[in-house]
Amino acid sequence: MSQEKVDLRKEQKHNRKKILKKQKMEHILLAVGGIVVAVAIVVWAGFSAHTKYEEKKAETPTYYSVDTSDLTEYLSSLQD
């Protein structure tokens, strides 16, 4: 091996703890970043689906007819 390779190997061996610590930190940051992106995508998809559901629900309102004749009859009997 050439002297440059030997020197490089010695430097790597000398700084092994720093290198491993840096690699571990990069791995953790990459994992956290991936989780953040995944959560953002899930939240975005859920929000979009909820918005579309609410829009569709607002387009078709539901109307109910109520027969109040019995109630009116009861109230008039109370007043007599």
Image: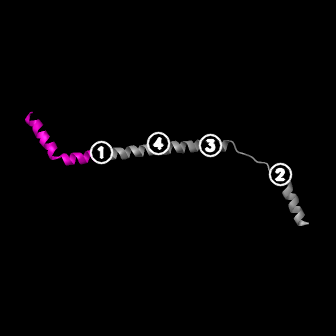
Name the residue beneath numbered marker 1. Answer: 26
Amino acid marked by disc 2:
Asp
**Residue 39 lies in the magenta stretch:** no
Q: In what quadrant of the picture does the N terminus appear?
A: top left
Q: Tag on residue 55?
A: 3
So how many labels did they put on this image? Answer: 4
Residue 17: x and y, percent?
20, 48
Amino acid marked by disc 3:
Glu
To which quarter of the image does residue 31 belong? top left
Position of residue 64 in the picture relative to residue 45 (left or right): right
**Which of pointers 2 and 3 indicates the residue nearer the eye?**
2
Q: CA distance from mark 2 to mark 3?
A: 30 Å
Q: Tag on residue 67?
A: 2
Find numbered disc 2 in the image and state the secondary structure of the residue it sits on: loop
Residue 71: x and y, percent?
84, 58
> Which mark sits nearer the N-terminus, 2 or 3?
3
Find numbered disc 3 in the image and state the secondary structure of the residue it sits on: helix
Amino acid marked by disc 4:
Ile
Find numbered disc 4 in the image and state the secondary structure of the residue it sits on: helix
> Which mark sits nearer the N-terminus, 1 or 4?
1
> Which mark sits nearer the N-terminus, 3 or 1?
1
Position of residue 64 in the picture relative to residue 74 (left or right): left
Q: In what quadrant of the picture does the C terminus appear?
A: bottom right
Q: Which residues are magenta?
A: 1-24
Q: CA distance from mark 3 to mark 4?
A: 21 Å
Contact (Cβ within 8 Å) of mark 4 with mark 2: no
Name the residue beneath numbered marker 4. Answer: 41
**Which of pointers 3 and 4 indicates the residue nearer the eye?**
4
User: Within 10 Å of the Cα at label 3, are there few (<14), some (14-19), or many (20+) other Cα atoms?
Assistant: few
